[in-house]
Structure formats: C-alpha cells, structure tokens
Amino acid sequence: MARRNDHSPEELTDMATRRVLDCLESTPASELSLRSIARDIGYSPGTLINHFGSFSLLLLAANARTLDDLYQTLHTAIHTANEEKSGLKAIASAYLAFARQRPNAWRLLFELRLADDEPLPAWQEQRIAALFTLLEQELLKLKPNARVQDCQQAARVLWAGVQGICQLTLENKLFSPAGMADDSEILINSLLTHYLTSWTEAE
Amino acid sequence: MARRNDHSPEELTDMATRRVLDCLESTPASELSLRSIARDIGYSPGTLINHFGSFSLLLLAANARTLDDLYQTLHTAIHTANEEKSGLKAIASAYLAFARQRPNAWRLLFELRLADDEPLPAWQEQRIAALFTLLEQELLKLKPNARVQDCQQAARVLWAGVQGICQLTLENKLFSPAGMADDSEILINSLLTHYLTSWTEAE
DNA sequence: GTTCTTAATGAACACTGTTCAATAACTTTC
DNA sequence: GAAAGTTATTGAACAGTGTTCATTAAGAAC
C-alpha cells in the first residue's frame, strides 16, 4: 500500500494517544498493545512505529496528555483552598482524586521506563517542573522567609510522600489492620499536617 | 519426554526463584522471560507453569525471597541505632541501601500486579505484616503512650513516604534543580525528622 | 509384573514489538 | 501536462512471548 494522507501527522498523534487513554479507562497499561491501538485507529503497526519511533514513545506521548490534564486539575484545585484547607492539602486531595479516577493512566506516568539511551524528552521534563513549581509556590506562602532550596526540597519530600501513599493504597499494599483509619485522604492529611507543622516552625 | 525426578519440587522452586533473582542483578524485570529462566535451569517452560501456575506466580515466589532478605536486613539494621540515629532512621537508611543495591528485585516487589482473581497469598501478606510490625515497635519506643492505631497509621504514612522517595530518586523522577540537596538520604531524613517531631509532640 | 499415577515435554496457538522492501500517492521539476 | 523524485503506508517476515495440552515414560502401588 502507499501513502494515504487522510490524516496529518498531528491528527495521527492525536488519534493514537487519545485511543491509548481511552483504553486505559478500562484496561491496565500492561494489556495495551501497539497492534490493537493501530487496529483501532485504522492504521498498521508500522505506521505508528514510523510516527512515534517505538511503542514506548507512543505511550510517552499519551503520558504528556495525562500530565497536561493533571496540571490543569491541580492548578484549579488551588483555588478551592480556604482557611481550613491549605493550598497544599487542596493540591494533594486533587492529586489523590485524579489517581483514583484514572488509575491506569496515572500509573503509566510512573511505570513507563524508557531504554537508557532514550532520555526523557525536554517537553516532558518541563511539564514535571511546572508541577513542582506549583508546590514550591504554596510552600513559600506558608513560610515566606524560607530559602528557595528548602522549598524545593520540601516540595520533593511531600510529592514523593503523597505519591507513595496514593500508589500503595491504590494497589492495596498498605494492609491496614482493622480499626485503623486507612482512607488515603487521612494518611495524606497526617503526612502534610505533621511534616508542615515542624517544617514551618523550623529554624 | 517423561518425568525426570532429578529435582524435588522444593529444589525446583529454589532453582527457578534463585535464577530469577540472579537475572535481576543485571537485568530489569521487564526483560525477564519464562522461557529464558526455564532454559537456564534446564527445564521446559511448561514445567515451570505446572509448578508455579503462571509466570507471574513464579515472580511472586521470587518476591517472597526478596521480602525475606529485606526483613533480615531491616531487622539487623535496628541494632545500629544509637542516640544520634533513631531506630526508624536506621531502618529507613537500610531500606534505601537495599533498594539501591538491588533495584530490579526491589522494584519487582511493587511492580508485580496479579490478576484480580488471583489474590495475594497469605504467606506474602504475613511477610509484609512483619515489616510493618517492625516499624510500629520503633514508633512505640519513640512515643510510649501512643495509641496502637496511631502507631499503625504513622507506620504506614512513613513507609509510603520513604517508599515514594526511594522510588522516585531511583527512577530519577524528582528532577532536583541545581543547588538543592537531593541525596535521597537527606530527603528521607527530612521526612522522618519533621514528621516525627510533630507526631511525637501531638496531643 | 502389571496397573496407576504423574512430572515433564515438544509442538501448537495466538499473540507481541520491530524491521524492511515494495508500493502508490503526493510534490517537484522540466 | 508528463516525467522524476520523495515519502507515508503497508503486508509480510522475524524472533520472541506466555500458555495449553496430548503424549510420553519414569516412579509408586498393588
């Protein structure tokens, strides 16, 4: 067969990544396949490989969409903060809700490991940096005289901590004994409250 | 071919799981295959399926060994604690060292997701419960009048938090800006110090 | 020594991601 | 407008995957 030209490259990217995310609504990432995605959008496997470079890079392109959605979600969540619920807690809640609502797409964000000779593209790093900036700004509000480096560090500790809680609860790997409050919302709240109490007071 | 009987079932389990862990020393879990493991130990793929039930369950059996090693490591680490380094920090350090030393085996502990109709076997849950107990005991030492449920909850928050830090640094996904102290040891220390400062004082 | 049980197998199945020569539709040149 | 050049798309082939299953023969039971 020969060139068809009934979709532009941008349209192809859009169709393929959208199809990936649609599948992830009901199917774990491990059950996706290049061939089924190609079949679904009416192209051959080779076409997708030509376009994205590899199946992994197609998934990475889908991750970019997820990251954009996530950024939007967290960004608007900040405005739901009030005197009882700090911006950071609002962000964390929104993050947990996002992970719960789209567990497969969210997991793929962290599961996907590229080959060592394929470094993470710059556009992906920028998206993640933007997320961290969101956190750092909130931390600075909480402790206006904090050093920039301390905010950066605390942002990473909290991010990783919340990430761990979301992940382990999603996978049911916290094995909470009966009688223990184990809603991840409560665990996250405990993490933020205790950490920030000491962090804002320190020094 | 017919039955060989030159290895007992226990020996077969031992050979196969050991081979899996040996491979993980130099190869990520995603590159393992049932067929290569079978080839390496001189059996057919079908034999391993007969014995373990599926490739995933073979990996799960390998995870059991890793969990046992991890428990031993953490258990002995407690004794390195002194007045400057609490038992919890000693455990966290040992945990990080373990993850760094055997990243592929450590990752497999969390990556492996069984089908929904294959619940985690009891012997696996017991191993994980033992790890949590280790933490809860240390927390009780730190705050002798704490309620059991609070120790259980704090153990899970800290475990998940340390887990998140280990994972994200191992995957290089914290994108630490220049000038920020980003050694995971420091991040973990920040998490434990701040969280525990507030937690032990609370109420 | 014969029957019964069962561990182990190779072949088959339906997949997978990736490569690549062949193709035909567009684009450019004359 | 026709010929030459470019390139998106393809099907077929490749080497691999996990799993199933009838067939086999060694060991156990009688």
Image (spheres, coloured by chain):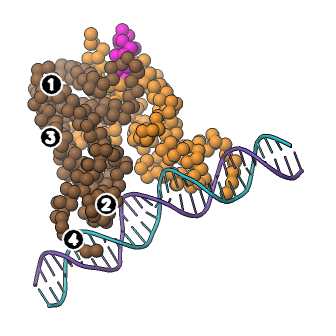
Chain colours: A orange, B brown, C cyan, D purple
Query: Residue B193: x, y in percent?
Result: 22, 21
Residue A177 x %, y %: 20, 41
Q: Secondary structure at mark 2?
A: helix
Q: Give the labeled residue for mark 1.
A: B86
What's the residue type where badge 2 is placed?
Arg
Question: Is residue A152 in the magenta section?
Answer: yes
Quarter of the picture holding the C terminus of chain A: top left
In this rendering, the answer to whether A9 lies above or below A202 is below
Residue shown at 31%/44% (left/top)? B26
Viewer-closest of B79 and A141: B79
- Helix, strand or loop status at disc 3: helix
Chain under callout 3: B
Residue A197 falls in image quadrant? top left
Q: Is residue A102 visible?
A: no
Q: Is residue A1 visible?
A: yes
Q: Which mark is residue B4?
A: 4
What residue type is disc 1 on?
Answer: Ser
**Cα distance in 3D space between marks 3 and 4:** 35 Å
- Element at badge 4? loop
In the image, what residue occupies the spot 30% across and 60% down? B38
Residue B72, disc: 3
| Circles 2 and 1 on the same chain | yes
x and y percent of residue A73 in the render? 47, 30
Whichever of labels 2 and 1 marks the residue nearer the N terminus, that label is 2
Distance, label 3 to label 2, CA atoms, is 31 Å
Q: Which mark is nearer the camera, 2 or 1?
A: 2
- Number of numbered markers: 4
Of the image marks 1 and 4, the number of the one nearer the N terminus? 4
